[in-house]
Image: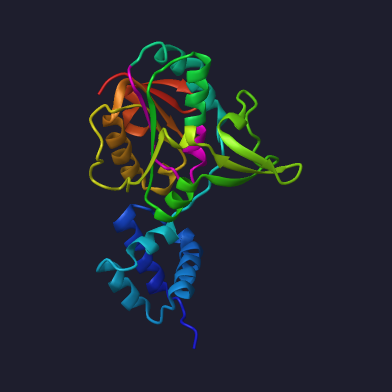
Amino acid sequence: MSLNISNNNINTAREMIYKIAGIYLPSSKDSTIKNRLDVLKRKFGIQDFDDFFNQIKQGQFKQEFINAFTTNKTDFFREEFHFEDMLDRILPQRLRGNEPMKVYCSASSTGEEPYSIAATLLYAREVYRSNTHMSVLATDIDTSVLEFAKVGKYIVNTKLNPLPTWLDLKDYFEIKYKNEYELFMEAKLNLKNILTFKQQNLYDSRYPFAHKEFDIIFCRNVLIYFKVSDQEQILSKLFSHLKIGGTLYLGHSESILNLAHKVERLGKNIFVKVMD
């Protein structure tokens, strides 16, 4: 007999993913929750959801539960104007000095965004003939996407995901064409060497980074999965790790919220930190 997913199961899952990861799924997402529970049911042969939820509370299946409820929509060089801003405004000045440069990508997903960041940094360093040390830290709560990102192999449909023409991707990826619009891309070592992938829950009360550690923080298209009050707390924590004069990039539908008085707004959700 097939196990039915009840409204109580849906509500328990909603409360649990919020408590663990801060992911907020309102009643309009009930069908999504049900679908995710159905995937878990088939994957683990769940016979009793109450027992399954108790096991999660005890630490078993916790990561699998988190992974099932994350959303991983991303592309290479998504919202390209942020990469162009790095190239045109930030990097020419920074690469004249020798002070190390650190970038934080707070929602790595399957890795397309951090690899795009790393390629942009390496391209600029070559253009400006700089020896500046650069590093990109990319984190996500979902361990499955982090493992995928570490491998660095992708199939890209260039019709759906147009790639930039201002740099030669072959300098950073091994590229093989599958057909006119699809290609295989594998990150080269020069990209991988400046990238570090780690797990981080943005809902944690504190982050394991130094005060004012980063020159640039990407926090794009992830805040939308949190309540506004939790968005404010996440932004506040991220902001504490951004240098004065550093840049925060948000997704096109996200807001700087209660930090508006501490930033200079440059448009297209580009924010420069002007005070703590």
Q: Nearer the viewer, residue 97 or 244?
A: 97
Q: 43 above or below 67?
A: below
The x and y percentages for residue 236 are 28, 34
Q: Residue furthest bottom?
A: 1
Question: Looking at the rendering, which quadrant does residue 202 occupy?
Answer: top left
The x and y percentages for residue 164 are 62, 29
Relative to 226, 156 lies left or right: right
Relative to 103, 207 lies left or right: left
Q: Nearer the viewer, residue 182 or 2?
A: 182
Q: Residue at x 27, y 66 (%)?
A: 59
Residue 116 visible to an observer of this rendering: yes
The x and y percentages for residue 174 are 60, 38
Question: Looking at the rendering, which quadrant does residue 248 occupy?
Answer: top left
Q: 227 above or below 249?
A: below
Q: Which region shows up in magenta?
A: 99-116
Q: Nearer the viewer, residue 44 or 175?
A: 175
The x and y percentages for residue 4 are 47, 80
Q: Is residue 113 covered in magenta?
A: yes
Q: Residue at x 44, y 15 (%)?
A: 130
Q: Residue at x 33, y 63 (%)?
A: 62
